[in-house]
Image (cartoon, rainbow, N blue to C red):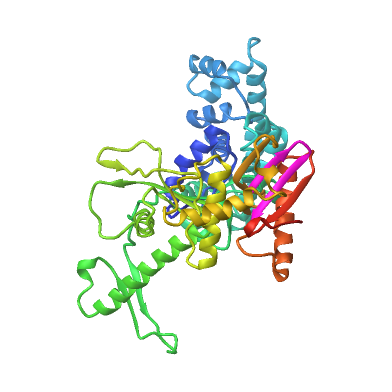
Amino acid sequence: MVLTRRRGILPEFECALRAAGIPYLSVGRGGLLRTLEAADLTALLRCLVATADDLALAHALRSPTLGVSDEDLLNLAARNESNWWLRLQASAREDAASPSLLRAARLLADWRIAAARLPVHDLLDRIYHDGDLIARYLAAVPAALWPGVVANLEAYIALALHLDAGRYPSLPRFLDELARLGVDGGDEAPDEGTIHADEASDRVRILTIHGAKGLEAPIVWLIDADNTHQPADAWSLLLDWPPESVRPTHLSMLGRKDECGARRTVLIEAEAVCAAREELNLLYVSMTRARQYFFASGIVSARGRAKASFWERIEAALVALGHNDGTYGDLPTLAVVSQSVAVPPGVVERHLPVTGVGRRIEASSPGMTYGNRLHAALEWLSAGGDPSRPPQSMAAADWPAYCAAARSILEAPRLKVLFDPACYLRALNEVEFALPDGSVGRIDRLVEMPDGYWVLDYKSGRPEAELLECYRIQMERYRATVRTIFPGKPVHCRLVFSEGESLDI
């Protein structure tokens, strides 16, 4: 998911996704008339109403519905008739006219006659049928974008029925209403079409933070995270209504700040506190949508500002947690990264280092602390680390005890072969994986032997009976994961406990 507070910045991101051939679902609220396919149809309808509208006709001719070539358009532009409609009809009567130009002239002439007597919906239905419109867009549009385009084509024809229940007696009245909705329709502006569920499962979803409540995704990007500018309403309502009261204790209109007066200061300040709390709620919502990875990106103006941005809050939290490189955590991983955009003058691009892998965080309980340090010792020694010195994550004073515990495991008779490079084909420590449903996990050690794979999971305690069922469920999940990633060989699972004890699952 890509999350934002402002829809106004989305066209740049949508354009980049289209250029890269990445399928996406946008918020789509009020955006139908801004799509290219809707603009194509509107231009087509306009040239049926006003034959002197050369720009609308040229647009319609070049759209997939009519598919006239650039060469044909240049030939029309060079003719002497007073407008393009007359040029098109005159060109179609000549022997040298191309098939696409002949087809366009015939269809447009028929549709113009139909426009004078058919309701708008029936006219569009005829255009869709006679022009083989759906098939032509299918041939012209990249596969990644097709579900969104066909949804918008369906939404456009449905719009002819939905606008005032279809009570528009003429095409000009319908076009006037589209123009109004396109310019200042606000909440009335028609939404983009809904992509069918079977087409929407493998797409980047672009949403406002409010719209993402209750949803999750393996990877979440919060864009424009360093922007604190939110356009203020010219007027707003100041309402004080305690929950226990049957009616408001105060109701008034708020205008410019210098006109608010002093009597309402307490209420205005309380409203500001609520707004600040809502800011934190939005940041919380955006960060908790991620199952696996969360990224924040943005640019910042060199000018000072009164309140902290989402970026600055995240950055400050990372510093407070002792992670100054921009990352924190086990899972999900959090990264604060710079946004690669063209930066206008007077704006400074923000950069923080990026890492794609989370790190283990030192646990506070003694048992978990021991387990994490034993993991680190096993990983260090099994990867060929020097036994005489500890890994960077461990104090020198603690190393002898953990080194001895790790070596007792590495040298245990049932385990030694799984740590001996001469016996295995390859071995990987700390193998992170993500499943299609967004769930994630980490295998402590994965070993490929000639006869199959071995999954080792380190446990710092002893094999207690009441925990074995939980361990069994965990290991079966690991087994299924390895079978999916590396099919064709059997997968064996073994729990490894302190002092070299082990148990096959």
> Which residue is rendered at x = 44% and y = 89% of the image?
244
Magenta includes 453? yes
* Residue 428 point in image, percent of width and height: 62, 42
Q: Residue at x 79, y 43 (%)?
A: 490
**Foreground residue among 5 and 386:** 386
In the image, 50 versus 445, the foreground residue is 445
Quarter the C terminus occupies: bottom right
Q: Is residue 416 left or right of residue 9?
A: right
Q: Position of residue 230 (x, y in %)?
A: 35, 57
The picture places residue 103, in percent across and down from the top left corner, at 67, 23
In the displayed structure, would residue 90 be above or below residue 350? Answer: above
In this rendering, does residue 331 appear at all? no
**Residue 345 rendering spot, x and y as whole percentages:** 26, 37
Q: Is any part of residue 342 visible from this angle?
A: yes
Q: Is residue 49 above or below residue 433?
A: above
Rendered view: 466 above or below 101: below
Between 397 and 358, the residue placed more toward the observer is 397
Q: Which residues are magenta?
A: 444-458
- In which quadrant of the rendered view does residue 72 lie? top right
**In the visual, does 140 lie left or right of 272?**
right
Q: Is 114 placed left or right of 177 in the picture? A: right
Where on the picture, by quarter, is residue 306?
A: bottom left
